[in-house]
Each structure stands twice: as structure tokens, then as C-alpha cells.
Amino acid sequence: MRYAYFPGCSLHSTAKEFNDSAKAACSALGIELEEIPDWNCCGATSAHSTSHKLAIALPARNLGIAEQMGLDIVAPCAACYNRLKSAEAAVKDNPSLADEINAELQAKFTGAISVRPLIEPLSAPETMERLAHLIKKPLNNIKLACYYGCLLIRPPKVLQFDDPENPQSMDSIVKTLGAEPVEWHYKNECCGASFSLTRVDMVHKMTHDVLMRAKKSGADAVVCACPLCQANLDMRQAEIEKKYGEKFDLPVFYITELMAFAMGLPADGYWKRHMVDVRPVLKKTASTKTEPEECTAGV
């Protein structure tokens, strides 16, 4: 499998561990990623609130470059996937808009390629079969709350990925890794990350509800595929614990980090970028033979 890889802004900055682990996991699993040359920001999360045309043109430029490469796009970031897929749908469904957008672009997008979230090829049956044979450190004895959030699966008519009411793609990966995915009702609820600068009170409430539900489900940690969700649930956890007088101690992993770790790939560099210490959870896995390096990001 070979794809045009769109990392997006977060994966080259605040979510570098997502980018690194995604590339490492894909390489081990035989998924070839060719980064889109000279890619630009997809416009999330502000472009669509400023200009509809800009919100389509920004991701459409990347679609045009990928079309020249002759490859479907995969995007690990849920927000990037949402914007790229929305632009794909808008251009395919509206020929006049497509002409207007393409008039401004050097690399034209005609709809010859499509956009997928990286979690789609990672959770494909053939990938799961390969993954099962590559596990060196099974995630035994831990329960994980797979958190899909809102951008990966909504709106369902546009994104057309997984079951929007009860998504299972990450759950299937978690099972293959040896962990137990918990059943919980907040796996597809919004964490409020897009309101981080405008409605902190709302973000606190929404993030608290996600963490509280994950904890009550018996989860040892949360797993996600969105830099906005990961940052919100991880970095805000201490202030939310203080505000609500509750203790969660829930590390928030990217699914690709756990895949790389379970396959025995170098992973200690990822844990240093987490605010909530991941070591207590990883120590619970029966086959973890060495302790991860000390987590210092939150100190």
C-alpha cells in the first residue's frame, strides 16, 4: 500500500510524536507513505469560519498535488482529514466551485484521487493480520478507552468512515495489540478543543465529561487519533482535576504510539512529550521488560 502522506501542521510541531510513531508503524507494517511536497495548512480550524472559498481552496491545493502524484491521500490528523475530505466532496459535488477553485491553483484537482484517514489502512484486516505477527510487547492487563471525538467521523455523509454512532476501527487495533477496549458512551463526543481560546469554561466542562466517563468505564488510559483531542485531554488534565476536585491519572496516547511500542520499535522519545505520566500504565503490561525513560514534559 502506497499513499500520499499529509502530516499537517500539528504533526510537524506540537504532535511530533504522532508523526514519528505513524511513520514508524506504517513502515513496519508495509504501508508506504510519500509526503506531499510543498504541502500547505489545511485551514483547520479557522479558515472555514472566515471564508468558505478559502476553506476549500487550502485543502484543494494539497489534493491537486496528490493527484499529480497519482496517489490517494492519508491524513493521520482527524482535523486535517475532515477538511481534506470536505474539500474533496465540495469540489466533486459542485463543478462551478471546482472551476473557480482550480482557476487559482497550479495543481488542479479533478477528483481522480480520494482522501482517507490513516486509521483506515491501519485497521484494515490485512494490516491487522500483519500486526498480530509483529507484536513483541503485547499490551496485556490494560484497558483502553478508544476516543474518536467528532472530527474523524462527522459529518458521516461526507466523511464516510466507520460507524458514526459506534466506531470500531481503533478498538480493533487495540484488541490486536493485546489490550481490552472498554465500552463507553463518550467515544464519539466532542472534547471542545476548538473553543480553547474563546470559551475555556465550555472546554473545561466538555473535557471533564470525557475524562470522567473514560475513568468510570474502567480505562487505564485514553487512545486517540487527533492532535487537538490529545492536547486537550492531556495538557488540561491537571487543571481540570484541580477545578473539579477529581483525580483521573489517564495518559492520552496516540494509537500509533501504542502500535510502535507493541511492535518493539523505539518509543521512549514519545513519552517525554506527554504531560500525564505514561509509565504506570505501561508497567502493567505483562511483557514490558524495560521501564520507559522518565516523563519530563509536565515537570
Image (cartoon, helix red, strand yellow):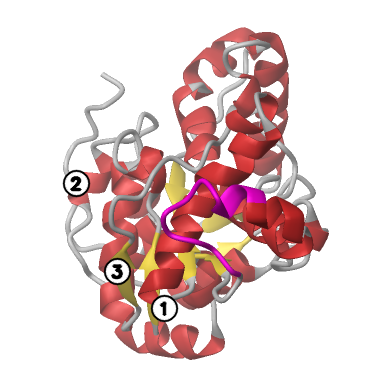
Q: Is residue 4 above or below residue 36?
A: below
Between marks 1 and 3, how big is the CA–CA gap?
11 Å
Does 192 lie within the magenta span?
no
Distance, label 2 to label 1, CA atoms, is 34 Å
Side (left or right) of 119 relative to 203: left
Q: Amino acid at mark 1?
A: Gly
Q: Which residue is mark 2?
A: 269
Q: Secondary structure at mark 1?
A: loop
- Nearest to viewer (mark 3 / mark 2): 3
In the displayed structure, 62 sits above or below 287; it is above
**Region rendered in magenta:** 100-110
Q: Can residue 75 be seen by looking at this rendering?
A: no
Q: Which mark is residue 70?
A: 1
Mark 2 is on which residue type?
Gly
- Above or below: residue 4 compared with residue 45: below
Task: Name the foreground residue: 135 vs 115.
Answer: 115
Frontmost residue, 11 versus 130: 11
- Mark 1 or mark 3, which has the lower sequence index? 3
